[in-house]
Image (cartoon, rainbow, N blue to C red):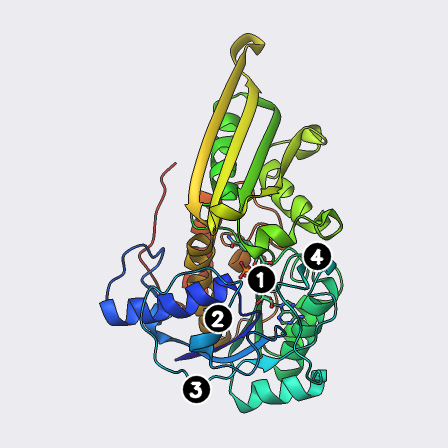
Amino acid sequence: MIKVGIAGVGNIASMLIQSIEYYRRSGSYRGLIHKVIGGYRVSDIEIVYAIDVSERKVGRDLSEAIFAEPNLVPKLVDLGETGVIVRMGRVLDGVANHMVEDFKPANIDEPTKEELSRELKENEVDVMVNLLPVGSYEASRFYAEVAAEAGVSFINCIPEFIASGNEGYPKLFEERKAILLGDDIKGQLGSTIVHRALASLIAMRGCEIVESYQLNIGGNTDFKNMLDQSRLYSKKVSKTTAVTSTQEKPESLAGRIYAGPSGYIEFLGNTKVSYMYIKALGFMGLPVTIDLKLTVDDKAMATAILVDVIRLSKALVERGVYGAPDWASAPYFKHPPKPVKSDYRSMSVLYEKLSEVGVSIEPKYFYTF
Ligand SMILES: NC(=O)c1ccc[n+]([C@@H]2O[C@H](COP(=O)([O-])OP(=O)(O)OC[C@H]3O[C@@H](n4cnc5c(N)ncnc54)[C@H](O)[C@@H]3O)[C@@H](O)[C@H]2O)c1
């Protein structure tokens, strides 16, 4: 089993917990990128520890907390009690002023770093997943340090530059013999990977992007939280770099690409709609434009990746791979330690490296182009 702790019992956490049960009961592999990684199936993932700060979630069994407001993922499978009681965390900058009603912190003493690290060890957590709201600069670093102190791997799903930054976190995790993967999880077939694929195709056909935007709208707390522009800087950097890094000269697109959250429309719920526009110059400098609308279940998209990276993190540690290897994050995150041009290439490199360190992965998608 892979024992997982989560920080932030929001919509992704709900989808994750329900998906583990769904794949366990159905025995199906439908919709998964990889069936087995390092011998682990999705059903081998177990959530053993959870932290939140909301008064609606703290103190409740996970099976109830994931359905507490303002979470929106519907009941997809019947869950029995998990025995995991959501624990009070440290609020820090996790709750924006305009989100106080949604994430109202419980009136309970906040724990120290040492207390949480001790609990991670006591619960034998293998990997901690950061699912805090965008803009949680301090809180993300706090939980990363809690994990490192306990020698527990850390998956950073949010656009805080922990694996890809220069604050020494990769080295810290390496010293603690744990893995650090991040930053900002890519969706399975979300706007980033689709935008990147189109941008790569345009470059491969000798055309040149002159301008592009990717406007994203949705109706969950993730989108509501991102209404505060001051919390958004890293999200825009992460999403924009993900697109420009596919090009030969990313700097030539400075100021000509916008990719980011663009509105909160409550009735959309977890449905995310993405409008993409690309203008490129082709043969003899004549223009080509692409307009595309993508509609996805935002939380399913993120969770499909999460079930891969959780298994990957455990398998890598078992093979003695520690720190923040860029090749492990590249296929799965928008802002990995080193930007990558091609998603096909980064997946192939992952397979090569896994084979070198002796981690099996099935199926493998081989691209001959
Ligand atoms: N497709 C995707 O959904 C996607 C893609 C990339 C990144 N992300 C990021 O993943 C993160 C999680 O997404 P979500 O939809 O589950 O968010 P959510 O808004 O549903 O949940 C956030 C949770 O964090 C809790 N929280 C706030 N401050 C906290 C603190 N200091 N300590 C512990 N818990 C705290 C809140 O109470 C809430 O339960 C977001 O930052 C989102 O932007 C999501």
Amino acid type at image mark 1: Pro
Say whether marks 1 and 2 touch (CB < 8 Å).
Answer: yes
The residue nearer to you, when weighing 279 against 263, is: 263
Kindly identify which residue carries mark 1.
325
Say whether marks 4 and 3 touch (CB < 8 Å).
Answer: no
The kind of secondary structure element at disc 2 is helix
Q: Quadrant of residue 312?
A: bottom left
Kindly identify which residue carries mark 3.
83
Percent across and percent down for residue 74 are: 39, 61
Q: Earlier in the sequence, mark 4 or mark 3?
A: 3
The kind of secondary structure element at disc 4 is helix
Q: Which class describes the residues within 10 Å of circle 4: few (<14), some (14-19), or many (20+)?
A: few
Residue at point 61%, 32% (across, down):
248
314 relative to 174 in the view: left or right: left
Q: Quadrant of the N terminus?
A: bottom left
Percent across and percent down for residue 286 are: 55, 10
The residue nearer to you, when weighing 306 against 346, is: 306
Q: In whole angstroms, how far apart are the C-alphas of marks 4 and 3?
A: 32 Å
The residue nearer to you, when weighing 243 against 248, is: 243
